[in-house]
C-alpha cells in the first residue's frame, strides 16, 4: 500500500508538471498567434490609411529598446543579426496605432483577455516596420512585420465574365527551410480586377487586399464568413458581360481590318512560305488564310536570346495542300516593333524541344501580337527572354544549377512570388494572344498519347491573353445568343495531378505575367485543379494602363 501511494503521488506530480508545460506551450502559442494577427490587422488598416500617416513621426515608443533586447537574446547568432537589422529602425519616432484605428478593420473583442497589447509603426522611405506585442500572465511576446509601398500596375490583370473558381488568400508556414512556404491553395492577382459575374471568396472581406491587391470590381461578391462591411470592400458593377466582351471582339477585329496587309498566305500562293519576312512596317499584318489546313503550329525557340546567339524569331507551320499532308513552314523574325499575325484556323503553340513539350520553356524573344479566328491551344510554358532567369531562380531553393529549358517545380516561397512580381516590367519582349470566337486551351499531358501522364501542373505564360466569344445578335430582342468560344480551359489537368503519387507535396500553379481577358474561365470545372492562381500586370501593354501605389506586407516574424 505504501508503494502504491508513493507511485500515485509521483504520477500526480508528473502529470502536474506535464500539464504545466502544456499550459505554458499553449500560452506562448496564443501570444505569438495573437501578435501576428495584430501585425496583419495593422497592415490592412495601413493599406487604407498609410497616406494619412503623420509626418514627421514624433511619438516616442519607450518599449523599442525592450523589443530589441528581447529578440537579440533569442536564436543565437540569428538574434545578433536581428539586433543589427533593427539599428536603422525607428530613429526614435513612431506611430502608435490605437484601438480606434484597429477597430476600423475588425472587431477587437477577441483580444480582451490579454493584459496588454499594441502596435507601433516606423517608416524609412517606402519601408514600414510594424511591431506588435501581447502580454498575459506576466509573459510578453513580440512580432515584427516588414511592409512596403509598391508601385503596382493598374493594367487590368483580370477581366472575366463567368469564373468557376472560388478565390482564397494564400497561406504560408515555416517548413522545409522556408519561412513563408506556400502551404495551401490560394490566389494573388496583382493589378486591377474586373469580374462581371458572381465572385465567391473563401475568406473574409478583410483579406481582399491580399487576394486582389489592385482592387476588385464585380457584379457581386460573397465572402466566408460574411461581414458587415462586405459590400464596401469592392466596387459593384452591373455591366452586361456578353455585351462588354462583344464590344472587345469588335474593337480587335476593327484593329486588324485597319492594318495594311503585307503578306497573305493562301492555298494559291503557298510558295510564299519560302520567302523572307524580315522587313515589314509596324501597321502591317501577316495573314494566314489557307482553306486546306485545319491547324497551324507556332513554335517558340527553346533558348533565350543572348549577346552571342540570336533566337529572335518564331516558326509557323501547317499541313496543307490537296492531300492535306504537305508540310509548309516559315520563320518569322522579330523587329523593332510589334509583329502582327492573324490565322483563320485553330493554332497550337509549342516550343522547339522534341520531348515533354508541355513542361519545357518556349522563349518569347521579340514582340508579337497573334490573333486567331478559332482556338489557341498552349502546350508549353511561354516566358519572356528578358525575364527567364528571374522566373527560373524563383522556383529554386538556394543556389542550385539553372535549368533554363524545363519548368516543373512550383514556386514555394510567397516572398519569391512577390519579388518576381516586383521585378516584372515590359522591356524588349512582348506577346499578345487573342482567340477570336475560340477558346484558350492549356494542356499539360506529356508522353506518346498526351493523356496527362505527367507529374507536374505548373504553367507560366507571359503576355496578354484573350478569349472572346463570337455571338449572334437579335436586334428585335436586343440580346446575344448562340455564343461560341471565349473560355479558358484546362482539360487534362485533373488527370495530370491524379496520376501524381507525390501530389500532397506539390502545388499546381498557374502564373500569368500579363493579363487574362475573356467571357469565362474554367466553366467546365477544370479551374478547380489550379491550386495557386498568380497574375501580375506590368505598367505597359496593349491594354494600356497607369500605375498605383499600394501598401503590402512582405514579411512576418514572431518570437
Image: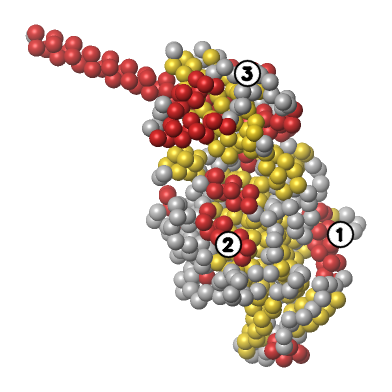
Neighbours of disc 1 within 10 Å: few (<14), some (14-19), many (20+)? few
Q: Which disc, if any, is residue 388?
A: 2
Residue under the image location 75 percent in, 43 percent down: 548
**Disc 3 from disc 1: Cα separation:** 69 Å
**From the viewer's perspective, is the residue at label 3 or at label 1 nearer?**
3
- Name the N-terminal-most of marks 3 and 2: 3
**Disc 3 from disc 2: Cα separation:** 46 Å
Q: Secondary structure at mark 3?
A: loop
Which residue has dot 3 on it? 60
Q: Quadrant of the C terminus?
A: top left
Neighbours of disc 3 within 10 Å: few (<14), some (14-19), many (20+)? some
Q: Quadrant of the N terminus?
A: top left
- Name the N-terminal-most of marks 3 and 1: 3
Q: Secondary structure at mark 1?
A: strand
Q: Is residue 124 above or below residue 329?
A: above
Residue under the image location 66 percent in, 81 percent down: 331
Residue under the image location 73 percent in, 74 percent down: 335
Q: Which disc, if any, is residue 172?
A: none
Disc 3, disc 2: CB below 8 Å? no
- Name the N-terminal-most of marks 2 and 1: 2
Q: Secondary structure at mark 2?
A: helix
Q: Quadrant of residue 41?
A: top right
**Front residue of 274 and 478:** 274
Please state the horizontal and vertical placement of residue 284, each as a whole percent of the image: 82, 75
Q: Is residue 405 above or below residue 511?
A: below
Please state the horizontal and vertical placement of residue 167, each as a whole percent of the image: 61, 43
Please state the horizontal and vertical placement of residue 362, each as a whole percent of the image: 58, 69
Identify the colour scheme used.
Answer: secondary structure
**Front residue of 233 and 60:** 60
Which residue has dot 1 on it? 474
Amino acid at each position: 500500500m505504501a508503494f502504491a501511494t508513493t507511485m500515485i503521488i509521483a504520477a500526480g506530480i508528473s502529470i502536474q508538471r506535464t500539464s504545466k508545460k502544456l499550459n505554458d506551450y499553449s500560452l506562448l502559442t496564443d501570444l505569438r498567434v495573437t501578435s501576428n494577427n495584430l501585425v496583419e490587422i495593422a497592415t490592412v488598416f495601413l493599406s487604407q490609411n498609410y497616406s494619412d500617416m503623420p509626418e514627421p513621426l514624433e511619438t516616442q515608443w519607450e518599449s523599442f529598446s525592450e523589443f530589441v533586447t528581447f529578440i537579440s537574446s533569442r536564436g543565437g547568432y540569428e538574434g545578433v543579426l536581428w539586433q543589427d537589422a533593427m539599428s536603422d529602425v525607428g530613429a526614435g519616432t513612431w506611430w502608435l496605432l490605437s484601438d480606434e484605428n484597429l477597430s476600423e478593420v475588425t472587431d477587437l473583442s477577441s483580444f480582451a483577455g490579454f493584459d496588454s497589447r499594441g502596435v507601433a509603426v516606423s517608416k524609412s522611405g517606402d519601408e514600414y516596420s510594424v511591431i506588435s506585442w501581447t502580454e498575459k500572465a506576466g509573459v510578453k511576446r513580440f512580432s515584427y512585420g516588414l511592409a512596403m509601398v509598391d508601385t503596382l500596375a493598374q493594367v487590368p490583370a483580370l477581366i472575366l465574365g463567368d469564373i468557376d473558381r472560388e478565390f482564397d488568400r494564400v497561406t504560408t508556414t515555416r517548413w522545409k527551410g522556408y519561412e513563408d512556404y506556400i502551404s495551401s491553395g490560394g490566389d494573388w492577382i496583382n493589378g486591377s480586377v474586373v469580374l462581371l459575374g458572381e465572385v465567391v471568396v473563401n475568406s473574409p472581406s478583410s483579406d481582399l487586399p491580399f487576394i486582389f491587391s489592385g482592387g476588385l470590381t464585380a457584379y457581386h461578391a460573397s465572402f466566408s464568413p460574411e461581414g458587415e462591411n462586405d459590400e464596401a470592400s469592392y466596387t459593384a458593377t452591373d455591366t452586361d458581360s456578353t455585351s462588354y466582351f462583344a464590344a472587345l471582339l469588335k474593337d480587335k477585329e476593327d484593329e486588324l481590318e485597319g492594318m495594311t496587309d503585307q503578306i497573305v498566305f493562301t492555298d494559291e500562293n503557298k510558295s510564299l512560305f519560302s520567302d523572307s519576312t524580315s522587313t515589314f512596317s509596324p501597321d502591317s499584318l501577316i495573314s494566314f488564310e489557307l482553306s486546306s489546313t485545319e491547324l497551324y503550329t507556332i513554335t517558340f525557340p527553346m533558348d533565350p536570346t543572348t549577346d552571342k546567339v540570336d533566337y529572335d524569331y518564331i516558326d509557323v507551320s501547317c499541313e496543307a495542300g490537296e492531300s492535306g499532308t504537305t508540310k509548309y513552314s516559315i520563320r518569322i523574325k522579330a523587329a523593332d516593333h510589334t509583329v502582327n499575325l492573324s490565322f483563320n484556323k485553330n493554332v497550337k503553340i509549342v516550343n522547339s524541344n522534341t520531348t515533354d513539350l508541355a513542361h519545357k520553356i518556349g522563349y518569347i524573344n521579340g514582340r508579337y501580337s497573334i490573333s486567331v479566328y478559332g482556338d489557341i491551344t498552349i502546350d508549353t510554358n511561354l516566358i519572356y527572354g528578358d525575364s527567364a532567369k528571374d522566373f527560373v531562380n524563383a522556383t529554386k531553393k538556394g543556389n542550385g544549377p539553372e535549368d533554363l529549358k524545363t519548368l516543373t517545380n512550383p514556386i514555394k516561397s510567397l516572398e519569391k512570388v512577390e519579388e518576381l512580381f516586383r521585378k516584372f516590367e515590359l522591356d524588349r519582349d512582348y506577346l499578345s494572344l487573342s482567340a477570336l470566337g475560340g477558346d484558350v486551351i492549356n494542356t499539360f499531358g506529356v508522353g506518346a498519347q498526351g493523356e496527362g501522364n505527367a507529374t507536374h501542373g505548373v504553367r507560366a505564360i507571359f503576355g496578354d491573353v484573350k478569349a472572346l466569344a463570337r455571338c449572334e445578335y437579335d436586334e428585335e430582342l436586343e440580346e446575344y445568343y448562340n455564343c461560341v468560344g471565349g473560355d479558358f480551359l484546362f482539360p487534362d489537368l485533373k488527370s495530370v495531378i491524379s496520376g501524381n503519387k507525390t501530389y500532397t507535396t506539390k502545388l499546381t500553379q498557374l502564373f500569368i505575367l500579363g493579363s487574362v481577358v475573356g467571357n469565362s474561365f474554367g466553366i467546365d470545372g477544370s479551374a478547380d485543379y489550379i491550386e495557386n492562381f498568380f497574375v501580375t500586370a506590368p505598367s505597359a501593354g496593349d491594354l494600356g494602363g497607369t500605375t498605383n501605389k499600394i501598401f503590402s506586407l512582405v514579411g512576418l516574424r514572431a518570437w
